[in-house]
Image (cartoon, rainbow, N blue to C red):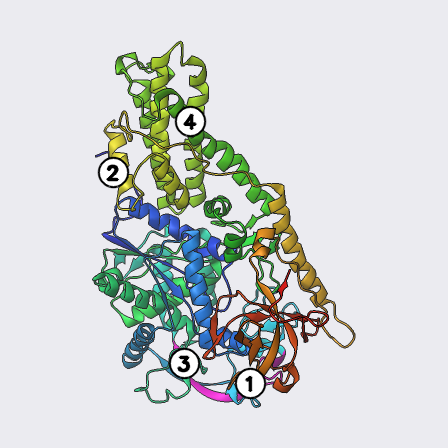
Amino acid sequence: MHPEHFSNTMRQYKRYLVTSALPYANGPLHIGHLAGAYLSADIYVRFQRLMGKDIVFICGSDENGAAITIKAMQEGVHPQQIVDKYHAQFKDTFSRIGISFDMYHRTSAPLHHETSQDFFRTLYKSGQFEEKESEQYYDEEAKQFLADRYIMGTCPRCGYEQAYGDQCEKCGSSLSPTDLIDPVSRLSGKKPVLRKTVHWYLPLDKYESWLKDWINTGNLDGTQQHDPEEWKNHVLGQCNSWLDGGLQPRAMTRDLDWGVDVPSDIKGHEGKKLYVWLDAPIGYISSTKQWAADNNKNWKRYWQDQDTALIHFIGKDNIVFHCLIFPAILKAHGGYVLPINVPANQFLNLEGKKISTSRNWAVWVHEYLDEIPNRQDELRYAMIKNMPEQKDSEFTWKGYQEAVNSELVNNLANFVNRVVVLTHKYYGGKVPDFDESTDIYGPDGIDDISFHDAELLRLFDDIQDMNEHIRSFDFRSGLKTLMEISTKGNQILQFNEPWKTIKEDPENVKVVMNLCLQYVAAIGIICRPFMPFTSDKIRQLLNQKPLTEKGELVKMLDQLAEGEVLLKKHHKIGEAIHLFTRIEDALIDTQINKLKAAEAVNTAANQTTESKEIQSIAPIKAEIAFDDFAKLDIRTATIINAEKIENADKLLKLTLDLGFEQRTVVSGIAEHYQPKDVIGRKVSLLANLAPRKMRGVTSQGMILMAENNEGKLSFISPDGNWENGQIIR
């Protein structure tokens, strides 16, 4: 076994538990989320699996907190509908982009509520909390206390008039609700009043001393827990900034009507929910419990055994919670390991501006996957190449195009394609055998080792360099090394020019082509952490089994260290395929125009009239092919009956006559039309929309409506006396 297999500055652990920040279930995922917490974790986990490590990758949807209820209020639905929608979308999006969680759970699950309540109860009974009375804002009209996000006002630092009670999104300042100038309730629009309420606080000030020592030295209770030199400077800097400023007690409960209940056996629990930053990180534990239950494992070995390395992958806005508050909670509870590293990334900007969900200035991952299908690895590559590991970075569509065309197409795909094409041309698609006595000798003046063996040893060393970058969370350098390996393969091919020497020196060509095929086989494994879909393509191309990520990389390193080839002589490979294709200007222009349209909408929204009425226009959606439009079956129909749906202010249940059949359709027009006013209306019906159950009623289609700047809806009806069921083209 080659000693470099185990070169690692970190302590060797028996197992690893890796978490990614729980995405908040009130909106879709954008590329900033991927760059912050998910791609980096996926690279690390896939690599460690390939190295044969016992590693579990945990995540889940964060489904509690004030922002969920605000989103539900805005859409006129129950919070459960919001979290169900985005939880399903998250799981689908993560799967499609290749994020390989072992368990993706959710904080609305009963197991999570039970785990969080048990945690709170243990802290409470062991005397870790302080009960305090304080004044908090209360909405007299809504008759409830207001969480931070329920309050808006003017930022005292920059003057932004729509700052939240916990943060100003314009200047980034952390705030308290009482900091705001002219605060208003987001529930009623009224000015809130201060009222007294009682909550349980975690006394972070009492933990300040050991937290400072643990963060900066890695020492905890006389044991070295981690090496601070392996932590990122900005992570340590942000932690020390908080520590130097003095930690303050932090409330662990809130007055809310959505979330995890304070255990009912605790006096004063009525109307109290757990603070989201208490229950959310406990979601890592409940997710691990669910994984363990599903796989007949012991979850405690991954949370309560000192031979486990706990690593949190997050964005920089979550550093304090994962490096100070959650470790304080874990130690106060007792019996849990603390993280050995929190390799937080910084922020990814988009086309020169900060990504903003409220301004729709984002590349939404699910839309990318829909609009640019079968290019998952192209996005992964472009984002890893510009990952904000040490400082903020930027994604641009032109940069994406350049990375794909110049690097993936011209380098990696070109190398693999030429090797496969030449192998089929010269050897019928079989790995050539060669007589080692005729091998090329003397590379770089070395005359005691063959060219073939020397290059395989260099390949081994280059792969080890890549591995070391991944182990130290330097994924950009790891990706760069991968592409340098591909470049070296291209250089071997280009320098020896087998297409010119095949007739005059066929034995030499066999050596070169065999070596290049070994390079392709190696790339099929080492690209896996970065581009898993490309790995599958290369393995299929070489007629090899798909990787299961169960030690294949360490096995390959053993082979190379022992001088063994990865593809045996006469092994039959498949026909050439295009690993990547060029990104054309038209596709890039469409995406840039989509962003410009979103910007135009926001510009219009910010231009107010004297009466402060907001002007807005809807952006043109991304281009579609005619074949996509042709799939829509739009028909003329007549509404023959209409009635309101109970407990749904926006919905009407409509019965439509299509001439050849009648349909039930649920439509969100109740705020604009009374049932009696729509009976007899001619409408346009999207008839082949998949059925969907809404408030217990199965809706079989969707009527088409126009919407003006004020949000008023109007029917789109065919002119004249059209019969029902006619096709609209």
Amino acid on which disc 1 is placed: Lys
**Foreground: 184 or 26?**
26
In terms of sequence position, does the residue under pointer 4 or pointer 3 come before the other?
Answer: 3
Is 420 left or right of 337, judged from the image as shown?
right
Which span of residues is magenta-colored? 182-202
Query: Which one is in front in this view, the residue at disc 1 or the one at disc 4?
Result: 1
Is 199 left or right of 181, judged from the image as shown?
left
Is 329 left or right of 235, judged from the image as shown?
left
User: Residue 156, image x and y in percent?
Assistant: 63, 72
Disc 4 from disc 3: Cα separation: 64 Å
Let me know if residue 201 is in the magenta part: yes
Let me know if residue 499 is in the magenta part: no
Q: Residue at x 49, y 60 (%)?
A: 29
State the residue position of label 2: 555
Disc 2 from disc 4: Cα separation: 28 Å
Quarter where residue 252 is shown? bottom left
Residue 465 visible (yes or no): no
Quarter where residue 74 is shown? bottom right
User: Residue 280, image x and y in percent?
Assistant: 39, 69
